[in-house]
Image (spheres, helix red, strand yellow):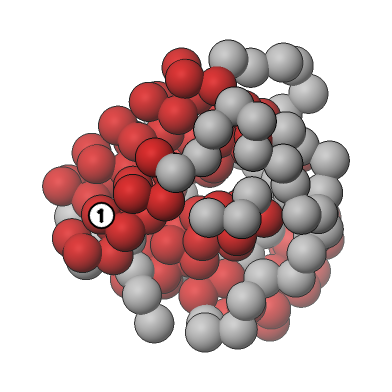
Amino acid sequence: MKDIYNQSHAEGILNRIDNLSPNSQPQWGKMNVAKMLAHCSSFQDIAMGNAFPPRGWLGILIGEFVKPIFYNDKPLAKNMSTIPTILIVDEKEFETEKEKLKQKIIIFQNNGPQKCTNHPHPFFGKLTSEQWGKGIYKHLDHHLKQFGV
């Protein structure tokens, strides 16, 4: 399984982000490309310990049992629900969001597992830094595939 802590895996993600354009269209879902970048950036904030969304009741009930879907080899399902606090509704500027996300990925990758948050994921609960690294890669890969890169 690929993970964002691996430099070549992170570089692959960054190259795919560079292949996006303001005109990139989603193959599924409702977000435009700028909103998707902002959504991924907000998710990075959670993993970096810069945002602390509360755990929802459904996550508390079943999160522990289903959390392997976050970091296993099976692709994420299209049109999955998201953490409410990172659902982007406002319009965003493509270039700004693209650069913001790229910088967060670089910082997270450079910081390594030791600087990953200890705060629980808002749905899946407690994750190891290794699980976060795989899950972040998987989440980014999912959304980049959504936009055909």
What residue do we see at 64% from left, 38% from top? 24
On the image, the x and y values in percent for residue 128 come to: 37, 69
What residue do we see at 59% from left, 27% from top? 22
Residue 129 appears anywhere in the view: no
100 or 54: nearer the eye?
Answer: 100
Q: Quadrant of the N terminus?
A: bottom left
Residue 18 appears anywhere in the view: yes
What residue do we see at 35% from left, 36% from top? 102
Residue 30 vs 131, above or below: the answer is above
Residue 98 vs 26, above or below: the answer is above
Residue 11 vs 32, above or below: the answer is below
On the image, the x and y values in percent for residue 60 come to: 73, 62
108 or 101: nearer the eye?
Answer: 101
For the residue marked with disc 1, what is the amino acid? Glu
Is residue 101 rendered to the left or right of residue 114?
Answer: right
52 or 138: nearer the eye?
Answer: 138
123 or 73: nearer the eye?
Answer: 73
On the image, the x and y values in percent for residue 47 come to: 42, 47
- Neighbor class of circle 1 (other Cα within 10 Å; few <14, some 14-19, many 20+) is some
Q: Secondary structure at mark 1?
A: helix
Answer with the quarter of the image where residue 25 lies: top right
What residue do we see at 36% from left, 75% from top? 2
Instruction: Name the residue carrying label 1.
Output: 11
Task: Give the total number of marks visible in the rendering.
Answer: 1
Residue 14 vs 89, above or below: the answer is below
Is residue 32 rendered to the left or right of residue 127?
Answer: right
